[in-house]
Amino acid sequence: MPAYNHAPFVAESIRSVLSQDFEDLELLVGDDGSPDNTVAEIRTISDQRMQVLAHEVNRGAGVVTNELISRCRGKYIALINSDDAWLPGKLSYQVGLLEGDASLGAVFGRARYVDRDGNPIDKSSMQFGHIFDQENRSRGEWLKRFFDHGNCICHPSMLIRSEVYREAGMYDNRYRQLPDFEMWVRFIRRWQLHISERELVHFRILPGENASSHTPANSVRTMNEHYMIARSFFDGVSAELLAEAFGDRVVHDPRKSDLHADVEKVLLFFGYNQWLGHMYRIVGVAKLFDLLASPPHREVLLRDYDLDDRAFHKMMGESEAFRPANPLHTVSGRVLLQELKQRIRRRFA
């Protein structure tokens, strides 16, 4: 539990963990230099299973979270925000799921929203109230969902195998809005996840205070972080997983060769995306520029995709990556990709 400035809520959060019917646990609480009475509230609770690390300097939730994870000794790791609370039976239920299915790397659940005073909030009254109510998908379907729409997983509902953090790495503190989403993108390249229909956490809504609150700064930061994640989104994604996820969008089967997989990953950024398309085109233009500088990729681009410098010049003139789209003269990503496929069909007809 990374804690910061949650004096009114942190004791409830801690008790919700210590009162779980699965008792073979350790609770590590790290305060990130809270200026309020959070540490004092934490120390009102004494339990031999709990360890408290209080820091005087605020360094960021990602730093504290990673330090806590590195100290964990258990087979499984769960995270909880210091203003949220777990529902009874959460841990025993999730441990049973992971113990029963070795193919799962992590399990999640749904959220029950509450306000500052603990009163329930109807999901339907919130713009993204049902965002965590997701169906289960294959790894390829999850990769596609993440690429098309972004995050949709309730982080504080998670129970994850500790080996995942050892092998995939932990959270990147450079991200403030989307550190968990960036983690799920890395996660799904190798592991399967499961989302239960069961509500497992009281998710507290504090307008203007939650890291995910829809403030102007958070909205701008979110898009900037989506851009940073997009730059490495397909790094380490196998050709098999790419084909499973985007088989209906690729021009050539990415399993044909590593070079074809590289090209297909780049072309996906030129597809239609209502929310992220403008930013994706910026990434796609830069990556295609780099592929054209690689002789092996250039050969494949010309031979199998009819793409050379002149075609790239045309795309650069039609893909307005660096200014808001003007519907009078902008060619959308969807049209660009359609034209590319038509060029290939005409060449090899």
Image (spheres, helix red, strand yellow):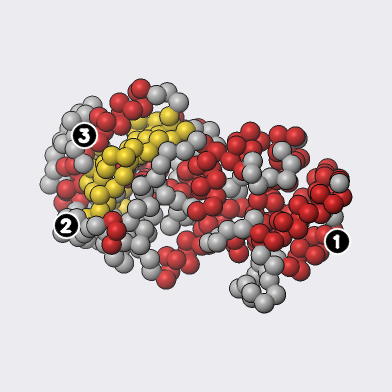
* Amino acid type at mark 2: Asn
Query: Which residue position holds label 3?
Result: 89
Work out which quarter of the rendered image holds the N terminus and state it.
top left
Coordinates of residue 50 in the picture (x, y in percent):
21, 37
Question: Which residue is found at the position 47% from the left and 44% from the top?
Answer: 183
Precedes in sequence: disc 2 or disc 1: 2
Question: Which residue is found at the position 22% from the left and 46% from the top?
Answer: 85
Q: Is residue 197 above or below residue 25?
A: below
Count the numbered circles shown: 3
Coordinates of residue 188 in the picture (x, y in percent):
51, 38
Q: Residues within 10 Å of mark 2 (few under 14, many from 20)?
A: few
Query: Which residue position holds label 1?
Result: 310
Question: Which residue is found at the position 21% from the left and 41% from the top?
Answer: 87
* Amino acid type at mark 1: Arg
Query: Which residue position holds label 2?
Result: 119
Horizontally, residue 46 falls left or right of residue 30, namely: left
